[in-house]
Every structure is written in structure tokens, then in C-alpha cells.
Image (cartoon, rainbow, N blue to C red):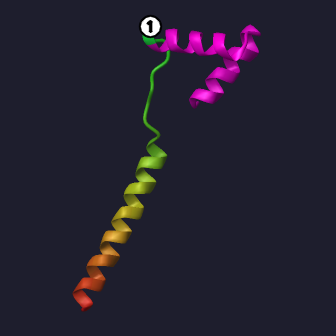
Amino acid sequence: MNKKEVLDKIKEETGCDEESAERIFRKAIKDGMVKAMPNWNFIVTIAIYLAVLITGAWALWQHL
């Protein structure tokens, strides 16, 4: 879940406003109840695109 989804779930379950949900979210991160994790799908996708671009540039360089 991303931050927006977590905030929406907090607001839905507690019935609080955006500011209170943000405060609850920050406290949950501070207390270790919620952990920030990288979006591995995005990172792998970028790595693949970069590998393809670098390989293409290398192939063009070798052709010249």
C-alpha cells in the first residue's frame, strides 16, 4: 500500500480528518508499526529500460 491508501484506510476506519490521519500515520512510522519500503517493481522496470538503452547506445557506437 502506498501512503495515500494507508491514509484513506486510517480515515475510513477511524472517521478522522486528513490532518489527524497524517498524525496517526507519522506516529505509526515512528513506532515501527508501518515501514517504508521501496517500490521494487518500479526500480526493476527502470533498471531494465536503462540496460536496453545502454545496450542500444553501445551497439550504435560499435556500428560507427
Q: How packed is label 1: few (under 14 Cα within 10 Å), some, or many (20 or more)?
A: few
Quickly name the residue at label 1: 31
Q: Give the range drawn in magenta.
A: 1-29
Q: For the N terminus, give its image quadrant.
A: top right
Instruction: Report which quarter residue 51 is drawn in.
Output: bottom left
Residue at x 41%, y 51% (from the top left corner)? 44
In the visual, does 52 lie left or right of 28?
left
Label 1: which secondary element: helix
Instruction: Report which quarter residue 47 is drawn in.
Output: bottom left
In the visual, does 1 lie left or right of 18?
left
* Residue 9 place in picture, x, y as percent: 69, 20
Q: For the C terminus, give its image quadrant.
A: bottom left
Q: Is residue 51 above or below residue 22?
A: below
* Magenta region, main secondary structure: helix
Q: Which residue occupies the foreground of this view, 45 or 7?
A: 7
Residue at x 51%, y 14% (from the top left corner)? 26
Residue at x 68%, y 17% (from the top left corner)? 18
Q: Which amino acid does label 1 sit on?
A: Asp
Whether 7 is among the magenta residues is: yes
Whether 53 is among the magenta residues is: no
Residue at x 65%, y 14% (from the top left corner)? 19
* Residue 33 place in picture, x, y as percent: 49, 12
Instruction: Report which quarter residue 20 is drawn in.
Output: top right
Q: Is residue 56 above or below residue 43?
A: below
